Amino acid sequence: MYTVEQIAYGGWEHCYRVFNHEIELIFPADIGIRLIHVGFIGETNLFHQVPEDLGRVMDEDYRFYGGHRLWHAPEHQPRTYHPDNHPISVDYQGELVRLTQPTETSTGVKKTVLLHMDQTTRIRVIHRLTNTNLWPITLAPWALSVMRAGGMAILPLPPRQPYSPETLLPTGQLALWSYTDLADPRWTFGRSYLLARQVPDAPTMQKIGLTVTSGWAAYLHQGTLFVKCFTHDPNGTYPDRNSNVEVYTDGTILELETLGPLQTLAPGESVEHIETWQLFRNVPTPKDDAEIDRQIVPLIEGLSNDLPEVFD
């Protein structure tokens, strides 16, 4: 179904490459969990890598490294930024590749990511947080993909309906940060979709959170479409004013982020947040809602967060 090999990559001696006949995923075992490369074999890495962080190990300060990471929300300094610069354990169990990070000494949270790749261009990424403390803690799993520069995020807005006596209540909201500027040309608001462009060397940061009930978000870079599928819990309470999807961008990166609902974990309990990734080639860049409906949505229709059941 897929192959796993040990390689050197990005200045790290101990990395793993998980691949099938079409796509590849690479992560180092020398630092905290980072999926540092994803893409079609031999083609562009869709993830951003922080040049000055590549190859570094055992640092005392937090480093971003780039790629895809697992955090727990809500964001707070210093809790969120526990340094994760030490080696992880990697093992295989059935059809899963399991990455386990040392328990965070400052929070008591243990992070685990499980990977499942089939024979297509799909990857299931299971994010797991475990409370190892002797007391309950409240958190939400937070999956952040740091995308390479020059692309565009596509986020579906809540379903639209004409005004009627049945549509008197709001169906969604935007979460704005103090530095969010809705007049920034990197944002394009349509009737059904929000577009967020990554502009290299842009001088300011931008961030928006929203509720995405349709279960997908995407990033398009030079014809390659990266889609995340996930589950939205209509009864859950999410961080950041009930946001289950967030986009952050600056002059270097765009982060495509999904979150699970807030959970109170008793000692020893865990919570999981699952994303299913899929890659597509030769996708034209849409300019408006009509082109998204015509060029992007048909690719995503039929996708879901459901792959054949796998067990840990």
Image (cartoon, rainbow, N blue to C red):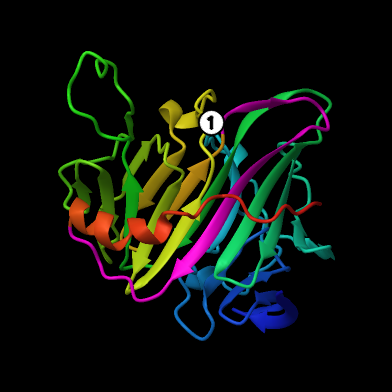
Q: Which residue is mark 1?
A: 233
Q: Quadrant of the N terminus?
A: bottom right
| 69 shown above or below 71 | below
Q: Position of residue 154 (x, y in %)?
A: 33, 53
Is label 1 in a helix, a strand or a loop? Answer: loop
The residue under the point 40% across, 75% down is 281
In front: 152, or 139? 152
Quadrant position of residue 182: top left
Number of marks drawn: 1
Q: Position of residue 149 (x, y in %)?
A: 35, 67
Say if the magenta span includes residue 203.
no
The residue under the point 72% across, 68% down is 30
User: From which residue to which does the magenta span run?
Assistant: 261-287
Specify whether 188 is left or right of 298. Answer: left
Specify whether 229 is left or right of 251. Answer: right
Q: In this orientation, does residue 258 appear?
A: yes
- Residue density around tag 1, few if under 14, some if 14–19, many if 20 or more, within 10 Å: few
Q: Position of residue 54 (x, y in %)?
A: 57, 73
What amino acid type is highlighted by mark number 1?
Answer: Asp
